[in-house]
Each structure stands twice: as C-alpha cells, then as structure tokens.
Amino acid sequence: TDATMHEHIATIENRGYAHRTPNGRFSPSELGVALVKGFGAFQNLHGRDGDFRLHLAAPRLRAQMEADMDLVARGMKTKESMVEACLSTMKEIFIMISDGPQPIDREIRDLERQQQAYLAANPGHRKGGGGQPAQRGQPRGGGGPPKGGGRRPFRGARRGGGGGGKGFYRRGKGGRAARRGR
C-alpha cells in the first residue's frame, strides 16, 4: 500500500540499490543498475513482446495490481480473481528467476570485477582516499570509477543478503527440486 512506501524507500537505500543526493533525490548505485539490467534480461530471454509483468524494475506491475484493486473496490472485479491473477504472475516470475538466475548473476559478477579492478588501481580508496579513514556519512575514497555517470562505487552489496556470491540465491527450501516434490 502507499502507507508502506516509506519502508520501501528505506529498504532500497539501506540495501545500497540507490543513494540520496545532496538535494534529497535518489540516484541509482552501480548495484541498483546491475540488478535492473539483470531483471530486464529476463524479459528479453523469457518474456513475450510487451509483457510488462516480467520486468520487475518497471512500475507497471504495481500499477496493474493497484488498478485491479480499484476494480475490486468498485465492485467490477472479485477479490478472488484479482488475488488469483496477482499470485499467478508472481509465481511465474519467481519460478523463472529461481530456475535461471544467470542474467542477474552475470550482472553482479561484472560489477564485482569492475569494483575489484577499481580498488586494485586505487588502494587508498578503502581508507577514505589519501590514506585517511573515511568519515561517517562521507563517500569512501572520494569517488568511484569515472564511468557510470559519476555514480559512487559499489558499496555493501553483501549487506542484507544481496550482492552475488554464495548465499545470494537461496536454493534450499524454495529451489527447483523443492517445488517438484523432491
């Protein structure tokens, strides 16, 4: 609901998908861009032309759900049919990503390689640049790689469970074998 929008925004910022600019606006982090690219690749690989449901970074999925809820509120659609359609879409997306997370993995690995190369070329970066410790609330190192429209370097992707590597995708209970009863 709109009442939880502030929680969504805080989560996006806390996980490092975007950061606030000095004027209070948000700018995507390199991690955020990598995730959008990875999720966007699913539409290209698996989606039908124009099937907005498969692009999780696009606002149309939420807009469609809100439009369906409005139809329920006006008595033009049943709650059951709205919930069924929403769950069907979400299940389709979940299965597709669980069965083939390679596009997201690829984008995260590319980002990690770029960051490792940057850190290798700029050894003082982790200390705040110039060998001085970074001050709380200040960007580490005073900037990142020049590419990417001046975005700050990748920070904290593993915080909160995201960011690639082991543990990024939890294959245990919700994996392909579990859904097939194995």
Image (cartoon, rainbow, N blue to C red):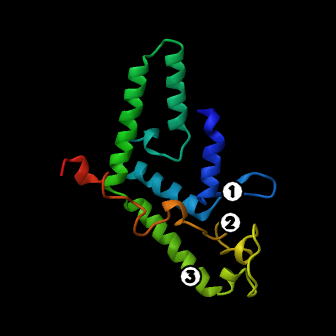
Query: Marks 2 and 3: in contact by CB < 8 Å?
Result: no
Identified at 51% across, 58% down, the residue is: 35
Residue 44 picture location, percent across and down: 41, 51
Mark 3 surroundings within 10 Å by alpha-carbon count, few (fewer than 14), some (14 through 19), many (20 or more): few
Query: Mark 2 = which residue?
Result: 151
The quarter of the image holding the N terminus is top right
**Residue corresponding to mark 1:** 27
Q: CA distance from mark 3 to mark 2?
A: 16 Å
List x then y, in percent, for residue 3. Answer: 64, 34
Query: Do residues under tags 2 and 1 come within 8 Å of each other at their CB atoms?
Result: yes
- Check disc 1 and give the amino acid type: Ser
Q: Which class describes the residues within 10 Å of circle 1: few (<14), some (14-19), or many (20+)?
A: some
Q: Which mark is residue 70?
A: none
> Looking at this view, is 149 or 139 the one in front?
139
- Measure the alpha-carbon separation of dots 2 and 1: 8 Å
Task: Return the disc, 2 or 1, that comes first in the chain's sequence.
Answer: 1
Question: Residue 117, labelled with which disc?
Answer: 3
